[in-house]
Amino acid sequence: MADQKEDSRSWFLRISSGTVFGPVSTQGLVTWAAQGRVLAGNEVSTNRKQWCNAESLSDLDISWYIEDDERLLTGPFHRRVAEKIIA
């Protein structure tokens, strides 16, 4: 994403049920990700026509995995969400 100070884009979030939320600012979308409201597999768009996976936006930081006792990975999650799950 562009420098957030200059980023005036509005985003829409589409979850697995097809429900669309937004518009929300880039910073708002980042906050939603940190709160666990944006998950891997959700889609984001600036125009409601072209969608991309939320985890493909590096600023959302949905790139953290949790390894269980059997060494299986679950995720990706936002770092704060992963920390809450582990705690």
Image (cartoon, rainbow, N blue to C red):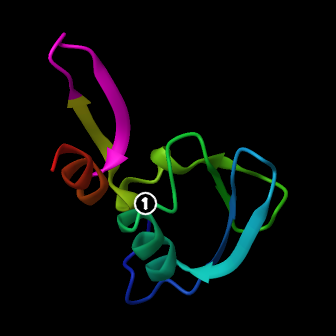
* Of residues 51 and 42, the one drawn nearer to the viewer in this rendering: 42
Image spot of residue 38 (x, y percent):
51, 58
Left or right of residue 68, residue 11 in this image: right
Q: Position of residue 50 (x, y in %)?
A: 78, 52
Question: The residue tagged with tag 1: helix, strand or loop?
Answer: loop
> Label 1 amino acid?
Gly
User: Which residue matches tag 1?
Assistant: 36
Q: Quadrant of the N terminus?
A: bottom left
The magenta region covers 67-78
Above or below for 22 versus 6: above
Expressed as whole percent of the image width and height from the top left, the position of residue 53 reads: 59, 44
The answer to which quarter of the image holds residue 23 is: bottom right
Q: Is residue 57 above or below residue 68?
A: below
- Residue in the image at 72% along x and 70% along y: 21
Counting every numbered tag in the picture gives 1
Q: Is residue 46 left or right of residue 72?
A: right
Q: From this view, report whether residue 53 is shown above or below residue 80.
A: above
Q: Residue furthest top?
A: 70
Question: At x 26% / y 47%, what residue is drawn?
Answer: 85
Disc 1 packing (10 Å; few <14; some 14–19; many ≥20) = some
**Image point 23% across, 55% down: which residue?**
84
Query: Residue, x 39% and y 81% (percent of image)?
Result: 4
Is residue 13 in the magenta section?
A: no
Is residue 75 found inside the magenta-colored segment of the image?
Answer: yes
Residue 33 place in picture, x, y as percent: 43, 63
